[in-house]
Amino acid sequence: MEWSLSRLIKGDKVIWLIFTILCLLSLVECFSAIGTLSYSKGNTYGPIIRHGMFLLVGYSLVVVLHNFHYKYTALLAYVMLIVSIILLCVTLVSGVEANGAARWLSFFGIQLQPSELAKLSLVMYIAWALGKGRRSELEMEKAYWRVLIVTAVVVGLIIKENMSTALLILIFVYFMFLIGGVSRAHMIRLTILAVVMAGLLFSLLYFVPSMPGLDRWGTWHNRLHGSEQVDVLSPQYRQTDENRQVHHAKIAVANGRFLGVLPGNSTQRDFLPQAYSDFIYAIIIEDLGWLGLFGVPALYIFLLFRCKRIARQCTRAVPILLVMGSALIICMQAFVNMAVAVGFFPVTGQPLPLVSRGGTSGLITCVYFAVILSVSRFGASEDEAEVLAAEEAVEAEEAARLELERLNAQAPETPALSDEDYASGAE
């Protein structure tokens, strides 16, 4: 069994462990939080069986894909980027609306979220564009502008219905520029632009209640003002549709106390909207207490640092950017979700990667893990092979030199001619 498992699962074992723990945590906690959905569907086990099937498909996907060399992501990046842009355009025209936003497309009863596919394609595209740009300053300059243009197109198509994902992508691209080695002049300009635009956007969202053509503007305006809620212990406090999610999330966190109520005993799963997706971290804290509060963030932090270690073992820019980009987008989304669940951030709708219930986001996260494991398997070993080949070449050259010296030492010496011999030879 051990032999067959080692042949099936390759790459970094710590990444595999984190991935497996997150999948098991998702299965347990979604079953604990899925009560209202099961009730509305009239089927106790149907929703969790469906979620379990998605996890099984995702796990199988990682097992298969991590055996392919990461170099295939070069072609995949361009294909997925084109497909995702087309799907985003279709979503703007005929997207399926859910929770007040048209972010999904429906194919034969299966809902797909194109923004998730767009994020994955951007991770791969940016890694290859900036990786190849490291060859020269001119190439990096071209790569910088190409990435900016592609990012502007993707963000422009997403921002109307999914502002939180658009902002997440912009922040991610900024950090990828830092990791990728973009020139200091460009980074200074980007930083100034980002600060100015962030201040302008926040001011508009805070003071302008609505914006023509942007249906989600009012939602974000209300969420920003929701941060100024009256204390729940105050007589003036009233629960409304706007603060209901945050209200029950805080109750769930408070119920967790030290050891938690254990999975299946949550009281807020029946009152908290999207308890199995956007606010599953609150249910995890209620179920597991401090273990959930600190354990789940620790898993994502370990993932980030482990990927950093994998990146250090690589000498090429592309695998470094692939592994760090995949880890960065997972962890950024995770910490945004957890910050929302505990009330540190306005509600965004970002799921907890691999833990929240969701078909598209879960499968896309599995692809990120497959890319990380592929780099851990082929990135470092490929570089080690090059080093070994170079060392063998040096050793071969040294052996040839020693052999030549040995042959020269064994060759009979030619006696030097005396002056008399030279004179007689001249005659």
Image (cartoon, rainbow, N blue to C red):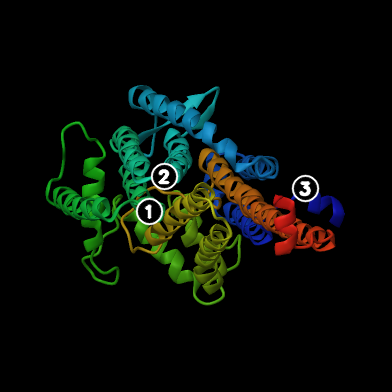
Residue type pointed to by label 2: Leu
Q: Quadrant of residue 59?
A: top right
Q: Spot the residue most to the left.
A: 207
Question: How would you rate the neighbour count of disc 1 (Cα within 10 Å): few for under 14, some for 14-19, many for 20 or more?
Answer: some
**Residue 411 at x, y percent in the picture:** 83, 58
Q: Which residue is mark 2?
A: 130
> How far apart in space, not on screen, are marks 2 and 3 (Cα)?
32 Å
The N terminus lies in quadrant: bottom right
Determine the secondary structure under disc 1.
Answer: loop
Determine the secondary structure under disc 3.
Answer: helix
What residue is rendered at 24% in x and 71% in y?
234
Q: Which mark is residue 8?
A: 3
Residue type pointed to by label 1: Gly
Q: Disc 2 vs disc 3: Cβ atoms closer than 8 Å?
A: no
Q: Which mark is residue 279?
A: none
Disc nearest the viewer among 1 and 3:
1
Q: Which residue is mark 1?
A: 181
> How far apart in space, not on screen, are marks 1 and 3 (Cα)?
36 Å
Q: Earlier in the sequence, mark 1 or mark 3?
A: 3
Q: Is residue 417 visible?
A: no
Determine the secondary structure under disc 2.
Answer: helix
Apparent side of residue 92 relative to residue 31 in the rendered image (left or right)? left
Q: How many marks?
A: 3
Q: Disc 1 vs disc 2: Cβ atoms closer than 8 Å?
A: yes
What residue is rendered at 51% in x and 71% in y?
294
> Compared with residue 420, is residue 83 higher up or lower down, i.e. above or below?
above
**Residue 132 at x, y percent in the picture:** 45, 42
**Residue 156 at x, y percent in the picture:** 29, 34
Q: Quadrant of residue 178?
A: bottom left
